[in-house]
Image: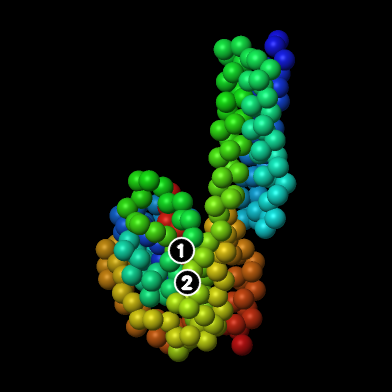
Amino acid sequence: MRVITISTDSPEDIAAERHLHGLQARMLSDVQLQVTDAFGLRNTGFHSAPPTHESVALPVPATLLVDREGRVLWIDLSKDYQRRSDPSVVLAAMQANFDS
Amino acid sequence: MRVGTKFGIAAFALAVGTTVLWFYFVRQVNLPEDRTGFVVAFLAAASLGVLAYIKGTGWIGGVPPAGAILIGVFFSFTIAVSSQSVESDKAIAVGDVIPSFSALDDAGERFESKDLNGHLVLIKFFRAHW
């Protein structure tokens, strides 16, 4: 199984901060939101990005499970940035979708 | 101690207490969907802070209500603007095939989405480090 993350951080920022969460994931930089827009996940509501942030917008926090043919099996969109995919919800979705 | 100062200290204690509870839930990744109680507590703290100034505070006694107002208004504002939305006709959905994409990783190396072919994948979009 592959795990990738996508954020608007620059590669340098990701490299500097990835130790904070200890993820083994391939962490991708999407400063111009090209990947975010390809998935249609740009937040069109109030994005509350910090003034120093180099990106003009942010993605809506989202978790996707994708099968071997590239088809989306499950998606969780945060309708509210203060609420994220609970890890237990993601794990349950992985068991339901990947173990079959 | 002036009455306003007492009000100010109470306001600050309420603001800080609510903030501590807030971050407790944040650390659990479990902020409730209905945060009305938080809004009420934060706005009550801010209102008590304003009341403290109306009652009159000393110079130093004026500091806690200022903190209560700042904290109360700030958190109420973030709750008010926290909703997120995408253009629903463009957003990827269950059953769609993911678009092909390419991006740099944290080592500056190019990643191509075709490398995911044949693998189960978890993709996580997040709001950056800040």
From the top left corner, tell me how far across and down residue B6 is, in percent.
71, 18
- Identify residue type, mark 2: Glu
- Identify residue type, mark 1: Thr
Q: Secondary structure at mark 1?
A: loop
- Which chain does tag 2 point to? B
Relative height, residue A49 to residue B124 (above, below): above
Instruction: Please identify the quarter of the rendering in which residue B33 is found.
Output: bottom right
* Apparent side of residue B46 relative to residue B106 in the rendered image (left or right): right
Q: Is residue B82 visible?
A: yes
Q: Secondary structure at mark 2?
A: loop
Could you give the CA–CA distance between mark 2 and mark 1, rounded to whole angstroms? 7 Å
From the top left corner, tell me how far across and down residue B26 is, in percent.
61, 50
Question: Do tags 2 and 1 sit on the same chain?
Answer: no
Colouring style: rainbow
Quarter containing the C terminus of chain A: bottom right
Q: Nearer the viewer, residue B96 or A42?
A: A42
Kindly identify which residue carries mark 2. B87
Q: Is residue A22 visible?
A: no
Residue B74: mark in rendering: none
* Apparent side of residue B104 relative to residue B79 in the rendered image (left or right): left
> Which residue appears at 56% of the width and 33% of the height?
B70
> Which residue appears at 60% of the width and 44% of the height?
B76
Q: Number of marks in the image?
A: 2
- Sort mark 1 into few (<14), some (14-19) or many (20+) by Cα contacts within 10 Å: some
Relative height, residue B21 to residue B86 (above, below): above
From the top left corner, tell me how far across and down residue A46 is, in percent.
48, 56
- Which chain does tag 1 point to? A
Kindly identify which residue carries mark 1. A44
> Which residue appears at 58% of the width and 38% of the height?
B73
